[in-house]
């Protein structure tokens, strides 16, 4: 009972902090997610057994360069996105292609650090500015869809789940839960489009599909990193929930795919 209360309070504080910082101003938004970035870098370095001093400096450098100083152009953003997607595809190949843990050498660890943690956070912080003005509702909408997918995947999986989705990595996930999460995320996307009208219903539904599909894969990939490291959570900063990476694994993996989708929309419109 006490653990459930702590978990609920911790989750409430996290959601309240995220929503208030995102909606208050672009400064509070980028500051909060900059802090999240540095914490996630430290947590990830512990998972892959990499000393975190230099990675934190590199993460801070990328944050200052691309977020604070806003080095921002179509070609720069596209290059960052494609570099991230390259790592994402390799992580998916590793996830589905091998049952053995792949630790990798030091250089490959740094590639994963940049492509899996640092650059996705940079793209996430760039996302509200994709139309050259700060629009926090883009981020709020994405997180609502992430939470919708997680919630209904759990509910449907708990109620009807029988077929394991990927048992050797995440024994509790089921195909029924995965499909249920996607379906309710599609419904949530349409409802969201009635209120956040800067995107069309089709764009929001595509956003929900990308978030639901790649968010689930992102959760599986982080689970594999944790299983390889022999730990239950990436950190302990959120009592009852684990680390920042545990809370943001889905969104940071989905972000580069979303960012590319929005860039294509802007290019063809």
Image (cartoon, helix red, strand yellow):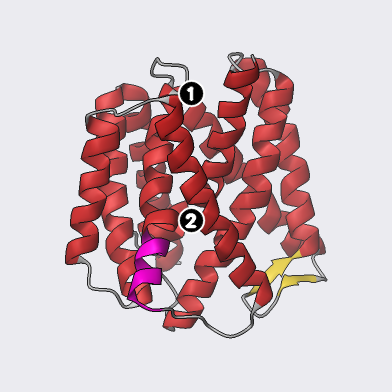
Closer to us: 80 or 32: 80
Q: Quadrant of the C terminus?
A: top right
Disc 1 secondary structure class: helix
Residue 70's disc is none
- Is residue 35 found inside the magenta-colored segment of the image? no
> In this view of the protein, can residue 118 be seen by the observer?
yes
User: Disc 2 on helix, strand or loop?
Assistant: helix
> Dot 2, crowdedness within 10 Å: few (<14), some or many (≥20)?
many
Residue 249's mark? 2
Q: Nearer the viewer, residue 207 or 15?
A: 207
Residue shown at the point (79%, 53%) measured from the top left = 179
| Numbered label tally | 2
* Within-10-Å neighbours for mark 1: few <14, some 14–19, many 20+: some
In three-dimensional space, the C-alpha distance between marks 2 and 1, rounded to whole angstroms, equals 20 Å
Q: Position of residue 265 (x, y in %)?
A: 63, 23
Marks 2 and 1: CB-CB under 8 Å?
A: no
> Is residue 211 shown above or below 90?
above
The foreground one among 245 and 106 is 106
Q: Is residue 18 left or right of residue 195?
A: left
**Earlier-in-chain disc, 2 versus 1:** 1
- Residue nearer the viewer, 257 or 105: 105
Q: Residue at x 37, y 38 (%)?
A: 18
**Majority SS type along the magenta span:** helix
Question: Residue at the location (82% across, 71% down)?
Answer: 163
Specify the label residue 137 is tagged with.
1
User: What percent of the width, then of the height, locates residue 21?
Assistant: 31, 31
Q: Is residue 258 above or below residue 134?
A: below
Magenta range is: 105-113
- Snapshot quadrant of residue 198: top right
**Image coordinates for residue 228, horizontal then vertical, percent:** 48, 81
């Amino acid at each position: 009972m006490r653990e459930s209360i702590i978990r609920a309070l911790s989750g409430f504080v996290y959601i309240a902090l995220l929503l208030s910082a995102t909606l208050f101003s672009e400064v509070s938004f980028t500051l909060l997610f900059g802090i999240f970035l540095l914490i996630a870098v430290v947590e990830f370095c512990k998972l892959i057994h990499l000393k975190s001093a230099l990675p934190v400096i590199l993460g801070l450098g990328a944050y200052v360069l691309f977020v604070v100083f806003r080095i921002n152009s179509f070609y720069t953003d596209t290059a960052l996105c494609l570099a991230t997607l390259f790592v994402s595809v390799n992580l998916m190949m590793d996830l589905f292609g091998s049952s053995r843990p792949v630790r990798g050498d030091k250089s490959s660890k740094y590639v994963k650090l940049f492509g899996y943690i640092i650059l996705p956070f940079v793209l996430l912080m760039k996302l509200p500015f994709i139309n050259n003005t700060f629009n926090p509702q883009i981020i709020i909408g994405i997180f609502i869809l992430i939470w919708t997918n997680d919630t209904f995947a759990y509910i449907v999986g708990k109620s009807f789940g029988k077929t394991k989705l990927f048992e050797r990595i995440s024994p509790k996930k089921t195909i029924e839960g995965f499909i249920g999460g996607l379906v309710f995320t599609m419904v949530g996307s349409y409802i969201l489009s009635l209120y956040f009208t800067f995107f069309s219903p089709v764009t929001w539904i595509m956003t929900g599909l990308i978030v639901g599909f790649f968010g689930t894969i992102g959760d599986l990939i982080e689970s594999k990193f944790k299983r390889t490291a022999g730990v239950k959570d990436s950190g302990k900063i959120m009592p009852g929930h684990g680390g920042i990476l545990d809370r943001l694994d889905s969104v940071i993996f989905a972000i580069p795919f979303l960012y590319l989708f929005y860039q294509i929309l802007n290019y063809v419109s």
